[in-house]
Image (spheres, rainbow, N blue to C red):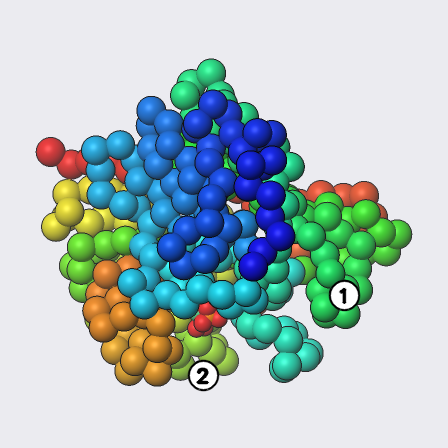
Amino acid sequence: MDNINYSLLNKRFGQHGQVTFTKDLNGMAVIEVANSHATATLALQGAHLMHWTPRKQRPVIWLSPAAKFGVGKSIRGGVPVCWPWFGPHPTQASFPSHGFARTVAWEMTDTQAMADGATRLSLRLIPNDATRAQWPHATDVALHIKVGATLEMELVTRNTGDSAVTLSEALHTYFAVSDVRQIALHGLGGSDYVDKVDSGDQLKHQTGPVTISAETDRIYVGSTTECVLDDPQWRRRIRIAKHGSRSTVVWNPWIEKAEKMGDLGTRGYLDMLCVESANAAEDTVTLAPDAEHRLWVNYSVEVLR
Ligand code: BG6
């Protein structure tokens, strides 16, 4: 049983039916958005966007058919918010991978029906004793999401304490693809990357688009420009624009790792590619007292005729 008052939330933030708070079939408290441009669903736990589908199009975001749902469990697929560290904690091996933001409760702070028909949602992470033990810093973190013909997300961290804070982060987006072996990811050619499948000791150099035919786990460093995920089989391109991010993570676990994970489904590795707008590896963010950092992305779809 959660102690969420759905009718109060619907009254306060409902936007005349554009935004609905409900408990879904998995028992998760979710926010459903439906407007003239798109539909979207977000779990309150983790502020985890689970789907975004522009009207008359295929889903853009992939959610695993074998995802596990529950209190404190990370959902496989969607857009996990990795914060305040990306990957393993730099010094504490027992702390959760990719930080705690994706598994703790967030609260709704605002919703807006925009003049252009889009819907804006704002959420804020609720710190608790466990998060304070793992992150003894005074920071506010908010996620703003604009559900429209494009999907915009902005992760805003403010240092409310009186000493500098260093963090890493990512919007760990799982994009739905026709067949990962058939797509090409443009925009990273000329960049160097940390290859986590290899030892990761030496930077490698990317020439041309990224294609996937084996396990891939890379942090492209100094990558600030947009990427385009070209999916000729589905006759579409997904444009991934960003600001406030100097690394891009490209991840697909491929067959063996996917089997071990147990929540990716049997052909999940073919159906998705993670392209994560991040500040990761050497690219951390240091915030002076009162300073703020914004990690912003915008996903748009170009349908090819
Ligand atoms: C990616 C990492 O961002 O996330 C991978 O680069 C990791 O190394 C993957 O395996 C999934 O992480 P998790 O914690 O969701 O299983």
Of the residues shown, which amino acid type is indicated by label 1? Asp
- Along the line of sight, the residue nearer the viewer: 87 or 144: 144
Residue at x 76%, y 65% (from the top left corner):
129
Please tell me which residue is depicted at 28% across the width and 74% down the height of the picture: 254
CB of mark 2 near ligand 1 (< 8 Å): no
Q: Which residue is mark 1?
A: 129
Q: Quadrant of residue 18?
A: top left
- 161 displayed left or right of 73: right
Task: Work out which quarter of the rendered image holds the C terminus and state it.
Answer: top left
Looking at this view, is 298 or 264 the one in front? 264
Foreground label between 2 and 1: 1
Residue 293 pos. (x, y %): 66, 45
Locate residue 222, reporting x and y percent.
51, 56
Q: Which residue is mark 2?
A: 199
In the displayed structure, 305 sits above or below 92; it is: above
In this rendering, is residue 24 above or below 213?
above
User: Do we see residue 20 in this rendering?
Assistant: yes
Say which element carries label 2. loop
- The crowding category of the residue bearing disc 1, from other C-alpha atoms within 10 Å (few below 14, some 14 to 19, many at least 20), is few
